[in-house]
């Protein structure tokens, strides 16, 4: 019996993408936040951006093979801004603010149409609802759900920045299952990638996994060994509701 539906955040409940404008805005805001904290990179925009990009590459080289997510202080002090040798006692206190800014500025984000209608439909079916999200900020997902006006639909929000583990690692799904108080065979998972969402949910034993295409799906899934395929692929997030309804009726 299906009792719970868990969702990815970026690319699933919301559309997200990166372009040159959002990249530039994030870098400029980062420079301004550092200046406000008394930290001067002493380089121009182009060199500053190149060194920040290199820092993200360093963090990705650590994070991606291990599926370990570090806390914002570690990410920004030890990887992203490590080249600048800023005093840790000045940089560390603003790292969560920086992480939050980066998540909402580097990415264009917008709630998908009909998300609230879909969630209400699932709620009316008696479903417990949750979010499992890879994120490098501690509080951004909570705040964004509030801004979208859908936070109250979710009984649980499990974040990589809190658990220290990233999808597709099983630990993320195990934590979410315990927090939402369901077993894998009672759960449906919805995400935009095979590499993180479908593979992770299937390995965890979820009853079904639904994929929705996003503007980042192809990039995230490039070259991935497709160990599992989604049970359904949808273009409209609302279609999750009739799929789950049919599953409860069968």
Image: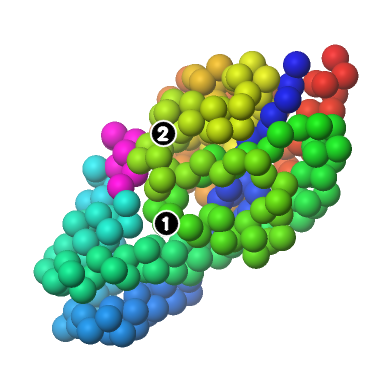
Residue 140, position as x, y percentages in the image: 50, 59
Placement of 135 over or under 222, stated as above or below = below
Residue designated by label 2:
223
Please indicate, yes or no, whether residue 199 appears anywhere in the rendered image.
Answer: no
Q: Quadrant of residue 69?
A: top left
Q: Is 172 drawn above or below residue 183 in the view shown? A: below
The image quarter containing residue 222 is: top left
Picture coordinates of residue 210, whole percent (x, y): 66, 31
Quadrant including the N terminus: top right
Q: Nearer the viewer, residue 98 or 139?
A: 139
Determine if the magenta segment contains residue 109.
no
Q: Residue at x 64, y 16 (%)?
A: 185
Q: Quadrant of residue 76?
A: bottom left
Q: Is residue 128 left or right of residue 81?
A: right
Q: Looking at the picture, how far across and down is residue 212, in whole percent?
A: 66, 40
The colour scheme of the drawn protein is rainbow
> Viewer-proximal residue, 127 or 196?
127
Find the distance from the CA under tag 1 to the CA under tag 2: 27 Å
Q: Earlier in the sequence, mark 1 or mark 2?
A: 1
Q: Position of residue 63 (x, y in %)?
A: 30, 42
Q: On the image, numbered disc 1 is attached to which residue?
A: 137
Q: Residues within 10 Å of mark 1 (few under 14, many from 20)?
A: many
Rendered-image quadrant of the C terminus: top right
Label 2 SS: loop
Q: How dense is the environment of label 2, judged by Cα within 10 Å: few (below 14), some, or many (20 and up)?
A: few
Question: The magenta stretch spans which residues?
Answer: 63-70
């Amino acid at each position: 019996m299906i009792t719970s539906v868990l969702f990815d955040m970026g690319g699933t409940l919301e559309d997200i993408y990166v372009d040159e404008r959002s990249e530039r805005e994030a870098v400029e805001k980062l420079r301004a936040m550092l200046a406000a904290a008394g930290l001067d990179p002493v380089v121009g925009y182009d060199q500053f951006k190149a060194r920040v990009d290199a820092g993200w590459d360093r963090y990705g080289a650590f994070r991606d093979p291990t599926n370990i997510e570090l806390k914002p202080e570690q990410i920004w002090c030890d990887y992203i801004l490590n080249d600048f040798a800023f005093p840790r006692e000045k940089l560390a206190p603003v790292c969560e603010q920086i992480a939050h800014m980066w998540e909402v500025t580097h990415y264009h984000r917008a709630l998908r149409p009909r998300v609230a209608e879909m969630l209400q439909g699932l709620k009316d079916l008696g479903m417990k609802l949750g979010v499992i999200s890879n994120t490098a900020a501690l509080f951004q997902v909570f705040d964004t759900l509030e801004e979208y006006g859908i936070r109250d639909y979710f009984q649980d929000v499990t974040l990589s920045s809190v658990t220290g583990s990233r999808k597709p690692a099983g630990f993320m799904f195990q934590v979410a299952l315990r927090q939402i108080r369901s077993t894998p065979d009672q759960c449906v998972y919805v995400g935009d990638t095979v590499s993180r969402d479908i593979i992770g949910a299937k390995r965890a034993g979820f009853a079904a996994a639904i994929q929705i295409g996003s503007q980042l799906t192809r990039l995230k899934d490039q070259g991935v060994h497709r160990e599992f395929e989604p049970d359904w692929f949808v273009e409209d997030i609302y279609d999750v509701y009739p799929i789950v309804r049919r599953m409860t009726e069968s």
